[in-house]
Image (tube, grey):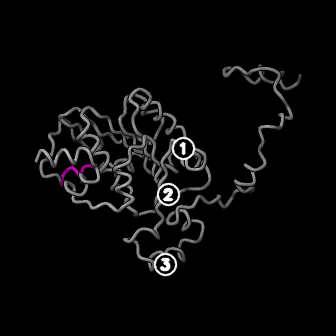
Amino acid sequence: MIAADLVHALDPAAFARDALGFDPDPWQATVLQSASRRLLLNCSRQSGKSTTAAALALHQAIYHPGSLVLLVSPSLRQSGELFRKVVAHLRTLEHEPTLTESNKLSLALENGSRIVSLPGTEGTIRGFSGAALIVEDEAARVDDALYYAVRPMLAVSGGRLILMSTPFGKRGHFFEAWQDGGAEWQRIEIPATSCARIAPAFLEEERRQMGDWWFRQEYLCEFVATTDQVFAYDLVMGALSDEVAPLFPVAGPIDATATDADVEPLFKR
């Protein structure tokens, strides 16, 4: 028993398979076993990303005492859904850990770990700090202000950040991290065509019913420009250059607290 528990502590994929009865796909095992502090999961709908993240959150809480795990989504209802997947995993354990707190939005283990689902508004989440793991679900639809509010919660702890989503246009922090976030991000892309649980016939029906724009994002993991976008993203980015001087340079720095009356003379010089 002790040997098995040690294996589970060291290998979240083994924990998922043996303790939770969840046999991960190869890509899910890669996510569970990843040592990266920054993970981007660009995955089709119904590919199993939420189930994977919930297993990882529970593993963190059980085998790393005192961990704070935060679940972030565009709305509290959505982060609550991810939290319910965590609870469902918890209920499958043969030896369920003792809880010192349990409600619809959070739980606390006897070892001092907590798992909390957060509301989707930047102004109401700033009280948390020292997070060991932050999972942002439907990241392409999470407001940028909320994303930038949770990142500092990892500053002291050196914790992990996982952004998972299907694309939603060429915009926002999820797209920017995927496109230009640098080598610190481990990127995993799983289109529906790579998921054996999703039948080709179903995908063909979805393509006909949803139209190309939605289908390519929801199932093929493609970042597609919005239908009302006047200029293509690649065209705009290709027109930018750091080597061209501004046409109207500002004479001096602008105080963030300055009024319109303070700023206007700078543009008349």
Residue at horizontal 53%, vertical 75%?
209
Of label 3 and label 1, which has the lower sequence position? Answer: 1
How far from the left and from the top, in percent, is residue 250? 81, 26
Is 127 inside the magenta-drawn segment? no
Of label 1 and label 2, which has the lower sequence position? Answer: 2
Query: Mark 3 and 1 residues: CB-CB less than 8 Å, in contact?
Result: no
Query: Mark 3 and 2 residues: CB-CB less than 8 Å, in contact?
Result: no
Residue nearest the viewer, comparing 2 with 247: 2
Amino acid type indicated by mark 2:
Thr
Residue at horizontal 49%, vertical 66%?
219
Give the residue number, with chain letter if any, for mark 3.
Answer: 205
Measured in 3D between alpha carbons, the distance from the residue under mark 3 to the one under mark 1, in whole angstroms, is 37 Å
Of label 3 and label 2, which has the lower sequence position? Answer: 2
Question: As displayed, is residue 209 above or below residue 6?
Answer: below
Local secondary structure at mark 3: helix
Give the residue number, with chain letter if any, for mark 1.
Answer: 183
Residue nearest the viewer, comparing 90 with 120: 90
Q: Which residues are magenta?
A: 84-92
Measured in 3D between alpha carbons, the distance from the residue under mark 1 to the one under mark 2, in whole angstroms, is 21 Å
Amino acid type indicated by mark 3:
Glu
Give the residue number, with chain letter if any, for mark 2.
Answer: 166
Is 86 inside the magenta-drawn segment? yes
How far from the left and from the top, in percent, is residue 61? 26, 40
Disc tally is: 3
Q: Is residue 176 left or right of residue 16?
A: right
